[in-house]
Amino acid sequence: MNTTHNGQTKLLATGINNIAVAFIVIGVVTPVTAVSFGIAVAPAPSLATAFFAGVWFCAGAGLHILARRALRSLKS
């Protein structure tokens, strides 16, 4: 039973961490990349843009911490 539980816990943590990475890519990496390449529809660099990038980053970091906490329930 421990092997099944550990496998399911690892899959859960991986899924949550993948969502965390997606949040950071969507909210931080994409706007920065768009601005650096000069894409016309890129958000203008402003305080609001930086704030929302920070919100996306914090959401991603929070999900990553949640995934790490899920791994604490692994059984030996």
Image (cartoon, helix red, strand yellow):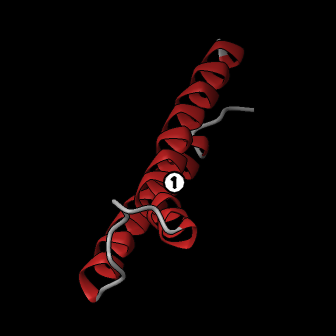
Q: Residue at x 38, y 62 (%)?
A: 40
| Residue extending farthest right | 76
Where residue 66 sits: x, y (%)? Answer: 46, 51
Q: Is residue 22 above or below residue 10?
A: below
Where residue 33 sits: x, y (%)? Answer: 55, 64
Q: Is residue 1 above or below residue 37?
A: above
**Considering the image in quadrants, where does the C terminus appear?**
top right
Asked whether, in this view, residue 71 is left or right of residue 61, the answer is right
For mark 1, give the secondary structure.
Answer: helix
Q: Residue at x 37, y 71 (%)?
A: 53
Which sits in the foreground, 66 or 73?
A: 66
**Considering the image in quadrants, where does the N terminus appear?**
top right
Asked whether, in this view, residue 18 is left or right of residue 63, the answer is right
Q: Residue at x 28, y 88 (%)?
A: 47
Residue position marked by numbered label 1 in the rendering:
25
Which sits in the foreground, 69 or 22?
A: 22
Which sits in the foreground, 4 or 53?
A: 53
Q: Is residue 18 above or below residue 35?
A: above
Q: Quadrant of residue 31?
A: bottom left
Where residue 36 sits: x, y (%)? Answer: 56, 72
Asked whether, in this view, residue 57 is left or right of residue 1, the answer is left
Q: Is residue 16 above or below residue 6?
A: below
Q: Residues within 10 Å of mark 1 (few under 14, many from 20)?
A: some
Q: Residue at x 40, y 60 (%)?
A: 27
Q: Quadrant of residue 6?
A: top right
Where residue 75 sits: x, y (%)? Answer: 67, 32
| Residue extending farthest left | 48
The amino acid type found where label 1 is placed reads Val
